[in-house]
Image: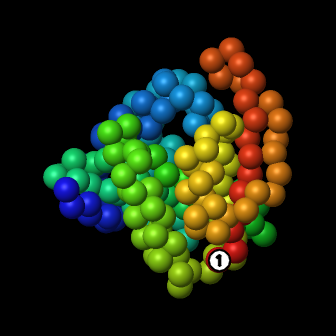
Amino acid sequence: MATIIRLPQTTDLAPLTELYNHYILNTTITFDIAPYTINQRREQWWCHYKHQGRHRLLVAEQDQVVVGYATSSQFRTKAAYDTSVETSIYLSPQAQGKGLGTQLYQALFHSLANEDVHRAYAGITLPNPASIALHHKFGFYSVGCYQEVGRKFEQYWDVEWFEKDL
């Protein structure tokens, strides 16, 4: 099954929202706790990627079905942070463990190569050995852990932060 990694299209908003909502409802990978409507996701997330500068959204498609995405987003809102990005990957459950995360990160970092980006960061809710392994594969290293920083599903969770030089 061939995978296409591409820029987003308007028709991707619904399947990307559905994919993210799966993680909201079923995992601690995101600390969002209420699912998004398509309109909320458009207004609060989608609009950040329309210019595709250092803030990128790449979509993975197999057999014309969206199966994942990778992003580089604003790390913090203050201007001095502009050359830092936060990265993330979300894959449909059936696409996990097949190298798709590697393909998405390769494409994402390749697309950022000529942008004014100095560092990439990733926050990973613990435990998540698969995500940690993927980030290590791309040169991320641990820079610290926020302990019990988020509460979801009536439990507190730690988040380990990773950094990568670009």
From the viewer's side, name the closer residue of 90 and 8: 90
Is residue 56 in sight in this rendering?
A: no
Which residue type does callout 1 highlight? Answer: Leu
Residue 158, given in percent of the width and then of the height, sits at: 76, 35
Mark 1: secondary structure? loop
**Residue placed farthest to the left in the image?**
63
Q: How many marks?
A: 1
The C terminus sits in image quarter: bottom right
Is residue 35 in sight in this rendering?
A: yes
Where residue 37 sits, quadrant-wise, is top left
Examine the rendered structure and indicate whether residue 141 appears above or below residue 30: below
From the viewer's side, name the closer residue of 159 and 15: 159
Report the residue at 59% width, 54% height from top: 133
Mark 1 is surrounded, within 10 Å at the Cα level, by few (under 14), some (14 to 19) or many (20 or more) other residues, namely some
Report the residue at 48% width, 24% height from top: 25
Task: Name the image colouring.
Answer: rainbow
The residue that label 1 is drawn on is 166
Where residue 77 sits, quadrant-wise, is bottom right
Residue 150, given in percent of the width and then of the height, sits at: 73, 30
Report the residue at 61% width, 40% height from top: 128
